Image: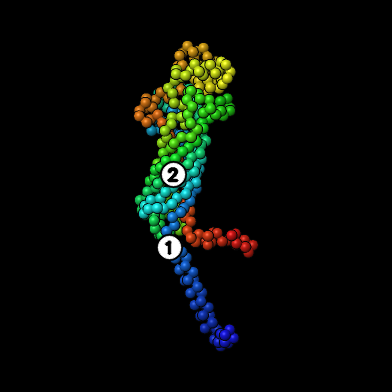
Amino acid sequence: MFFFIKLIFKKLTVDWKIAGLVLFFILTYHITMAQSHYRARFEEPWSFSLQAGPSQYFGDLYSLWKYYEGVQPDFNAGFSARYTFGTNLKARTDISFYQISGQDTKADPRSGRIPRDVNFRARNWEAAFLVEYYLKPVKVYNITREFFNPYIFAGVGASTNDPYANYRGDWVALRPLRTENEAYPGVVMVFPMGMGVKYKANVYMDVFLEGNYRFTLTDYLDDVSSFNMSGFYEDLIADYVSGENPDRLRLSVRQARYLLENGEPDVERIRRSGGAPRRGSGDPRQNEPGARYDGYFTLNFGVEIYFAQDIWDNWIFRKRRRGYRWW
């Protein structure tokens, strides 16, 4: 059979041979493109993203909405997995690492705060489950996703809670000290909610910008809640005088008027004051329902990858190196 095909091919003119080769390559190209587009015509329910950006704490040591204290950003980074389960809905799981901090030395005088020399920094982990609602449908073929798609989201999660204070150049863990005689937990509930917008970069990838505020059920993200020390100063003084845990009083009282020249707490003056040294901000808005709870905000830029059926065959994943595929 091969002999007869070879014989026929030899009898063809050069022009016919060239025309046949051109026809062969055209057919091959159209078949390949058709297969590529066909593989892209699937609903891809799973996607994964990486995101990062600034974070901002809100609490006794920072105010933005009423007083203009400027943005005092820290940082955060996270990983997310999403699953499309409705026409405009996605379920989402987040794992994030974030830093928040605050200090009253930057307080706007109109906030009613007095200098307390209180500061904190916390580096926490957060895990959350959320539901996203998109303005335009997301349960569509992968190749027909919208180029711009705004969305809102809300959910519930948990965060570690480990504030530290800078004391004489060292970072000291505050939660074990119980500076306000309160054994608050090391894990707290958070309620993330916010909005964002996605842009379709290509069939397999979106880029997005997202703002996410976390409401919490704790006033101890910053280790500060009580207005003053009047309810627990005697316990702090007892631990200081006995030497059992002197850092409790040292980190609870930072106002200069209640310190000795060497920077140690003035025990007698604190006793005579009846525990007057301030802890909380004194901001009257803190007395409003729900206002005592701390929170934090993140503004993230991210990249989301859709795990399509043919993503492993995409040219990015099959580049050759020294004649071998990467996998």
Query: Viewer-proximal residue, 165 or 231?
Result: 231
Q: Which mark is residue 41?
A: 1
Q: From this viewpoint, is residue 324 visible?
A: yes
Query: Viewer-proximal residue, 179 or 206?
Result: 179
Count of all numbered marks drawn on residues in the image? 2
What percent of the width, then of the height, locates residue 133? 37, 48
Element at label 2: strand
Q: Is residue 280 above or below residue 312?
A: above
Q: From this viewpoint, is residue 6 visible?
A: no
Question: Residue under circle 2?
Answer: 129
Query: Viewer-proximal residue, 31 or 22?
Result: 31
At x 56%, y 61%, the residue is 318
Q: Amino acid at mark 1?
A: Arg
| Quadrant where the image shows the C terminus | bottom right
Element at label 1: loop
The earlier-in-sequence mark between 2 and 1 is 1
What percent of the width, then of the height, locates residue 104? 47, 26
Name which quarter of the figure residue 212 lies in: top left
Q: Amino acid at mark 2?
A: Phe
Name which quarter of the figure residue 261 lies in: top right
Does residue 327 appear left or right of residue 127 in this picture?
right
